Image: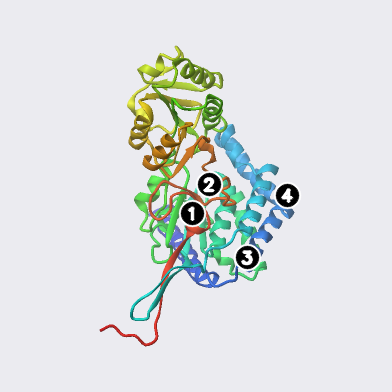
Amino acid sequence: MSETASSAPAAIESLEGVIDGIAANARRASLLIQNQPAASIDKALLAMASCLESDKARLREENGKDLEAGRRKGLSGAMLDRLALSDKALASMVTGLKEVAGLRSPVGDVFDERVRPNGLTIHKVRVPIGVIGIIYESRPNVTVDAAAICLKSRNAVILRGGSEAFHSNCALAELFSRSLLEAGLPAQALQFIPTTDRAAVEMLLRKDAEIDLVIPRGGESLIRMVVEKSRIPVIKHYKGVCHVFISRNADLKKAIPIALNAKAQRPGVCNAMETLLLDSGLDLQVRKIIAAELIDKGVTLFGDDESRALSGAIEPINEENLYNEYLDLRLSIITVNGVEGAIAHINKYGSRHTDAIVTESEDEAALFAERVDTASVMINASTRFADGGEYGMGCEIGISTDKLHSRGPMGVEDLTTYKWVVRGNGQVRG
């Protein structure tokens, strides 16, 4: 047997030991951190904000290694931009940390209190989930955002970032661990998987005795792999097939800017519009103007027969397109019969992420909000607002299209659960 072949099992066994140790340490740290005062958590977050500013040169050096490797791999300009720790990106992370530190922690909140006829008093109390695993791709800012929200809700977190940002993520995780120690908290409350070996992910996903929740952030293929392999509960969103419905009762001065912003402001993100629904009762000339404005912005339109009549530039569509998350300047455009038609279309083809209506009719808006099966409903606003920062969370751990236990942008409260507390005075059950 060759040396390479004989050493492979030993390498796997060694990696398994590393993952075992990380999971065990995270479990121990989770039990310690849940009882720490909120002031200590906030001190750690603010210390990390200071580190991002004081250690900028080192972060740039490590990030430079990732950028150079990305160029050699032929990553697109957009991917390199998302990977870069620019002044703007670092400033945004600093702002996010300060905002999360300023949030009120829900841990310890008492609710749903009741008194039983036998004198028992019963209530629920908000508690951390425990240990959370985050598996994500590319953007190093996720390292900071995810860690901040997990720690604010007094959870331990295990981070596994993408190989493209490995050096950047290692440096950021090291600074966060240092910040925890400065605040008198266990450094093991934040741990980073120190390898790009994909086998580490599968090993991590088998640690259901130590890890309570997994949140994948990235492309649909990553999320489906995590769901398939995980023994641990997963909160996910596969894709963002977001819709904007422009009603016959819409104000055109609102409708056009909303449609353009939802599609063209940043098309490569999950809350960008992927399908535009136009009410068949909307004036034909108005529909032509809306289509023309999108085409002028460089958007390629794919439409049904009625929508294709609006412009010779609109290409034919097939049903598969309606499930597409394009993530670029392509857009499906469909004509529907009123708000009922829009609701039926979204509930069939949507991904339960974010869907918008543009209308001046309160009745239409109320019906749409009530019946569309989606995590975020926008009324006379762009789908691009479906974001933790825009919702006042400081930053988010991700956007869930699940219904249990959280939905939409997930902040501090979404990383907590509850326990029942029953207080008696000697009562026994007969």
- Amino acid on which the number 1 mark rests in the picture: Ile
- Residue at label 2? 163
Of marks 1 and 2, the one in the foreground? 1
Disc number at residue 77? Answer: none
Dot 1 or dot 2: first in sequence order is: 1
Question: Crowding at label 2, few (<14), some or many (≥20) Cα neighbours within 10 Å?
Answer: some
How far is the residue under mark 2 from the one under mark 4? 21 Å
- Amino acid on which the number 3 mark rests in the picture: Leu
- State the residue at coordinates (58%, 50%): 392
Q: Position of residue 352 (x, y in %)?
A: 40, 42
Q: Position of residue 306 (x, y in %)?
A: 37, 17
Q: Residue furthest bottom?
A: 426
Dot 1 or dot 4: first in sequence order is: 4
Q: Residue furthest left?
A: 430
- Amino acid on which the number 2 mark rests in the picture: Ser
**Quadrant including the C terminus:** bottom left
How far is the residue under mark 1 from the one under mark 4? 27 Å
Q: Position of residue 157 (x, y in %)?
A: 52, 60
Circle 4 SS class:
helix
Disc number at residue 57? Answer: 4
Of marks 4 and 3, the one in the foreground? 3
Left or right of 19? Residue 66 is right
- Residue at label 1? 134
How far is the residue under mark 4 from the one under mark 3? 21 Å
Is residue 236 visible in the rendered structure shown here?
Answer: yes
Circle 2 SS class:
helix
